[in-house]
Amino acid sequence: MKRVLILGAAGRDFHNFNILFRHHPECEVVAFTATQIPDIAGRTYPHALSGPFYPAGIPIFEERDLEKIIRERDVDEAVFSYSDVSYEYLMHIASRVLCAGADFRLITPESTQLQSKVPVISICAVRTGCGKSPVSRRVVHGLRHLGLHPVVVRHPMPYGELAAQHAQRFANLDDLDKNHCTIEEREEYEQHIIDGTTVYAGVDYQEILAHAEQEGDVVIWDGGNNDTSFFRSDLRIVVLDPHRAGHELLYYPGEVNFRTADLLVINKVDSASKEELNVLRNNIRTFNPKARVVEAASRVTVRRPEQVLGKRVLVIEDGPTLTHGEMAFGAGMVAARMFGASEVVDPRPYAVGSIAETFRKFKHLGAVLPAMGYSRQQRQELQQTIADTPCDLVLVATPVNLEHVLQISHPSLRVYYDVEETSLLTLTNVLEEFARDCELRNMPAVRV
């Protein structure tokens, strides 16, 4: 029997296990490892999810102990199962595995993709923070305009009790509280819910897909990081970021998305240089010339821009975009500059606990505060960091209503950002063709 170690980050790793290994009599998964996300290691993938071959569940360890785990558990093969890593990082991990005496394996996306009974549109990216979420919302609005009833299935974010999160449905904002969602989960679910869209997420995507198929006539796969879709897609949309032009060929598995996309969306063209845009356009012509291309601006707005003028502002940005997405700034910094802030106050001298540790770990971060909130303690430390930072105004550029989960002691304004097509080809054009090709337009939607 082959002894397998799955290298993960609480998402893709569980899906790969469920599809490829849960009922495989010739393989034994001896452990998962965890990285990227705080407080994942030390848990167990429970028997309720791991199946009859694993009555005690499967332990989850820190990736930093990789060599020790391989030796002590006599691992034959390590399966890499998380996303948005540079090729240099990926090969360092592979080298560690090989030196410890195990084989190193990457899984082809098709081998874990589930077939849906209804059409699927997947929205993925080449890096974290390219703008998948506003593109997803734009696609949902476009499908509704065609008389369709789309349902969103979000890439997994199971950071709590795994058995309880096996298949979650979010239809209203109260569901976020009932499921004890982290800030990171709220960032992905909240805007969809406000728009009236049902969101599914969790751990067991076979069960999740079965529910989503019953509720909608189109399933939207809303991807996480730069991971590939868990579902076979009838239309593969992939978002590119010109501020990281060239990364579409340097990060795993973003390049897989880039090369296999049916439609590429170049976002943020309004803030990119001509040189950055030309790099992307040339790479598309070279590596995916069959893909159609939509170019779009990322329109940044605040409700009362006059309140920003001349103020010392603390900028709070989407956490994953800044951390493993490696962006130095996001929409909040754009808003601060656009609306005339006199100063962006550096939060680093005032950071406490895990927030200070985040700044130490991600050295590219500048005078912006990532909205880290994976646990109650981390949310308290984020709240304390905000309170201790001397400023006139807080610009909150995370998609979540942060004041619902934190007490912000300073005056604050939310920053909003949406995509707006600038090219002749638009998402509306593509969705009309999609609906016609799938014979979907004006079909009555199925409801639960």
Image (tube, rainbow, N blue to C red):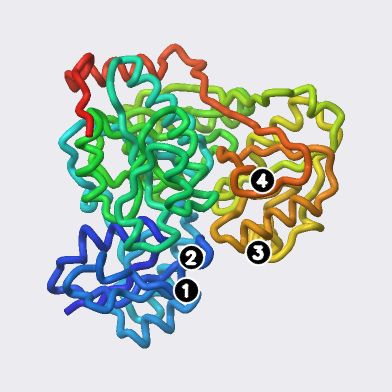
Give the residue type that dot 4 points to: Ala
For this orientation, the residue located farthest to the left is: 25
Give the residue pinned by disc 2. Answer: 35
**Residue 57 horizontal/vertical position (percent):** 28, 74
- Sequence-first disc among 3 and 1: 1
Give the residue pinned by disc 4. Answer: 328
Please name whichever residue, 346 or 289, is drawn nearer the observer in this view of the structure: 346
- Sequence-first disc among 4 and 1: 1
Query: Is there CB contact under 8 Å for labels 3 and 1?
Result: no
* Disc 1 secondary structure class: strand
Give the residue pinned by disc 3. Answer: 354
Sort mark 2 into few (<14), some (14-19) or many (20+) by Cα contacts within 10 Å. Answer: some
291 horizontally vs 394: left or right: left
Give the residue displayed 18% in from the left and 74% down from the top.
53
Give the residue type that dot 1 points to: Glu
Between marks 4 and 1 in the image, the one whose residue lies nearer the viewer: 1
With respect to residue 178, does 331 lie above or below?
A: above
Instruction: Give me the C-alpha separation between circle 2 and circle 1.
Output: 7 Å
**Residue 331 horizontal/vertical position (percent):** 64, 34
Instruction: Give me the C-alpha separation between circle 3 and circle 4.
Output: 19 Å
